[in-house]
Amino acid sequence: MGNSESRRKASSQRRGQIRLKAAVLQPDSPMPAFVADVMLGRLAKWLRIAGFDVLYSNRFSDDELVALSRREGRILLSRDTRLLVRKAVQRFIFLESESIQSQLRQVFEAAGITGLPGALTRCISCNDVLTEIGRERVRGRVPPFVFATQQSFKCCPMCGKVYWAGTHRQSVMRMLDKILK
Ligand SMILES: [Zn+2]
């Protein structure tokens, strides 16, 4: 038996084990929190847009991912079968698809998410909850057209990025709503 064949076999065995374990995930909150592995940066951003608390860093080690999941009750999102077969990993979602739409659909289904009351309330980069900021305080920090046409703004307390409602926001919500249905 060649090396690549035995690797394939081992990987397929891990997938089988993971599918058996996956049944353990019991949704226990309408707003579950997550921690995502390094391969899922795009999913982490989309879940933050959808309003969920998602820890993500390309510097988290496997041990840290598992510890964060256990200590803070976060669902571990991963594409890594070697990580997910670990005994210590209990609440997780194994993302097999590379498509962001399929990944989001899978997370919403597995975590029992049926609505997005917190959508667009978090910083996409930092995961922090946005706070209201007075219109006068964003003058010069947003494009003049945006300042002239928007009335309300939010700001990330961590990085200072300013957010506002716009056409981009509508298309993002349309995509999320479509996936939820
Ligand atoms: Zn931020």
Image (spheres, rainbow, N blue to C red):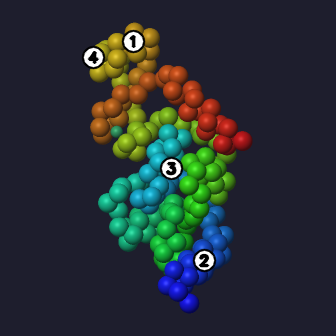
Residue 42 in view here: yes
Check the image and report above or below for 76 versus 29. Answer: below
Earlier-in-chain disc, 4 versus 1: 4
Q: Are marks 1 and 3 in contact (CB under 8 Å)?
A: no
Quadrant position of residue 128 = top left
Q: Residues within 10 Å of mark 1 (few under 14, many from 20)?
A: few
Number of marks drawn: 4
Residue 27: where, in percent of width, then height? Answer: 63, 59
Mark 1 or 2 closer to N-term? 2
Q: Read off the residue under disc 3.
A: 43
What amino acid is at disc 4? Gly
Residue under the image location 56 percent in, 55 percent down: 98
Mark 2 and mark 4 lie on one chain; the one further toward the N terminus is: 2
Secondary structure at badge 1 equals helix
Which disc is residue 140 wearing?
Answer: 4
Of 72 and 114, the residue lying toward us: 114
Q: Nearer the viewer, mark 1 or mark 2?
A: 2
Distance from the alpha carbon under mark 2 to that under mark 3: 24 Å
Q: Secondary structure at mark 3?
A: helix
Disc 2, disc 4: CB below 8 Å? no
Q: Amino acid at mark 3?
A: Leu
Q: Which mark is residue 30?
A: none
Q: CA distance from mark 4 to mark 1?
A: 11 Å
